[in-house]
Image (cartoon, rainbow, N blue to C red):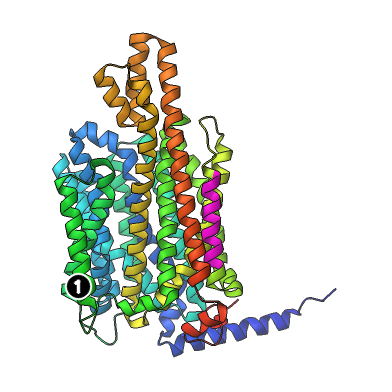
Amino acid sequence: MTASAPPADKAAKAADKRQRDWAEAEAEGIDAATYGRRWWILIAMCTSLLVVMLANSSLNLALPGMTADLGITTLQQTWVVDLYALIFASLLFTAGAVGDRYGRKKLLQIGLVVFTAASAYAGFVAGDGGELIFARGLMGLGAALVMPSTLSIINTVFPRGQRAFAIAIWTGIAGIGTALGSVLSGFMLEIWDWRSTFVFSVAIGVVAYLANHLLSPESRDEKHSPVDWLGGVLSTVGILGLVYVIIEAPSHGLGEIDILVGIAAALLGLGLFIWWQTRTDHPMLDLKLFRNPLFTISSIACTVAFFALMGAFFLMAQLFQLVLGYGTLKSSLLTLPIMLPMMVLAPAAPKIWARLGAKVTIGIGLAVIAVGFVLCSTWRTDSSYWHILGSLIVVVCGMALAMTPATNLILAAVPKNRSGMGSAMNDTVRELGGALGIAVLGAVISAGYSNGVTDATAQLPPELAEAAEGSLATAVMGVAPALEQAAGPAVAAQFLDTALASWMSGLTSAMLVAAVLAALAAVGTFIAMPGKEKEAELLHLHTLDEVIHA
């Protein structure tokens, strides 16, 4: 048996490591005061990140209450939910560039002020759907200013040897924020009304503002690279059109005029953006970065991971409430344990990455996601919570493995003075992945449900048939009770069984689509991502241990 090292040796090694870390920080231009409070700065950045993530996931449960209270129309409901995501996603690249040029802390604080003020207006003042839509749009603007700055500041206050672990914490918060928003909103709606979701955003926004004011240093591109304003306009138009089409096309179809306008905006805006980025001296997104397989594959991995996360949570909320019959609060609380592996694995992922390299770590993570979705495809109407929990834990474990090195590599591929560019790229692919997850999996499940329920609705009155074919929620909460009153419990139960089975059939197809997508991404990673030694070479290092201290 090998004797453990004497305490004196351990203390000497710890002191030597602290000295190396400080020397590395000093070499990277990080001042002593900033270095000394770097972990407090990380807490401030994660708090600011939570502001954005909670607002992105807490509204769905509050929507019925605000609809009844303010008399919001169906069209207004769509804009209340979607406008935040549309503005948020479309402005990320511009916000990242502006932060690099004029100050990341300054932009973060402006974003928090805008977000908090808009939340306060929605929570205390808004009296109709139009005012609420306006407030949500401003919240999206504030969030776009906040999110790239959080990761950019982390990238500039931590030396290379500690940066991977700090980004892993940020990644874990980004993952659990979605689930936490649903849980908190479910709890608050039990004791108060829909305005509580906005009031909570005010409270956490104020805390984040004060924490950043007291703790965070200012940083900017020391080369003073000018902002590519034309690139900002083109990227905003293109991404706005793309995200709008992703969100709206599944429910409206490709032939609607607004969808066609969105497609045109996406093609024209992104096409001109790519053209302009190859010609300007100071591009908002340097397209040469895509020659680096670390950057390209990591961007794809983040997209697929958030496709999995948002798609799974979108479907799981319906599964818990409509199929298994759980209440709103219970559904929210039962969601939280699914994210525990993210909290545990995300901080451990840097060591796994250091040992195995990004190719193996990200590839295995994506493969695990695929396996998890295959397990999700086995869900049935009588599946237990533990069956569902186990399947989704597998998905989340895969996400934790893939997202941490992928996020780090996106930032590592970008010059440190342009941290906003890397942060914006990371945030944009996450948003696009999440929107695609909800849209694609939602469309697959909707098609499966509509096909399966058609025969059951053939004998119904036209108005009930149309309602039943629209969504499972309408079938469960509207059509089934009406049938029970008109034709008796047996007929209603038979219809409900058919509707639930049809929806679950669509769910199975959706989970298999997600599994295939994740598996293809895993295969692509193993083929295209360089091995461990080549990875270190591309990062201009001798070994990966220079990226991550084991």
Identify the residue at horizontal 39%, vertical 45% (top origin).
Answer: 441
Inspect the magenta stretch and tell me whether residue 322 lies in it.
Answer: no
Identify the residue at horizontal 48%, vertical 59% (top origin).
Answer: 520
Identify the residue at horizontal 56%, vertical 78% (top origin).
Answer: 532
Q: How many marks?
A: 1
The answer to whether 179 appears left or right of 382 in the picture is left
Q: Picture coordinates of residue 421 (x, y %)?
A: 31, 74
The answer to whether 236 appears left or right of 303 in the picture is left
Q: Picture coordinates of residue 98 (x, y %)?
A: 23, 74
The answer to whether 250 appears left or right of 276 in the picture is right
User: Pointer 1: what residue?
Assistant: 231
Q: Secondary structure at mark 1?
A: helix
Q: Is residue 374 visible?
A: yes
Give the quarter of the image for residue 242: bottom left
Q: Picture coordinates of residue 498 (x, y %)?
A: 43, 24
Between residue 83 and residue 398, name the one nearer to us.
398
Q: Picture coordinates of residue 493 (x, y %)?
A: 44, 17
Between residue 118 and residue 378, name the one nearer to us.
378
Amino acid type assigned to the residue bearing label 1 in the image: Gly
Give the quarter of the image for residue 91: bottom left
Judged from this view, the residue extending furthest toward the right is 1
Looking at the figure, which quarter contains the N terminus? bottom right
Q: Is residue 472 above or below residue 487?
A: below
Write the start and end of the magenta stretch as one range: 361-375
Q: Please name the predominant secondary structure of the magenta segment in the image.
A: helix
Between residue 539 and residue 468, name the one nearer to us.
468
Inspect the magenta stretch and tell me whether residue 370 lies in it.
Answer: yes
Between residue 318 and residue 14, name the one nearer to us.
318
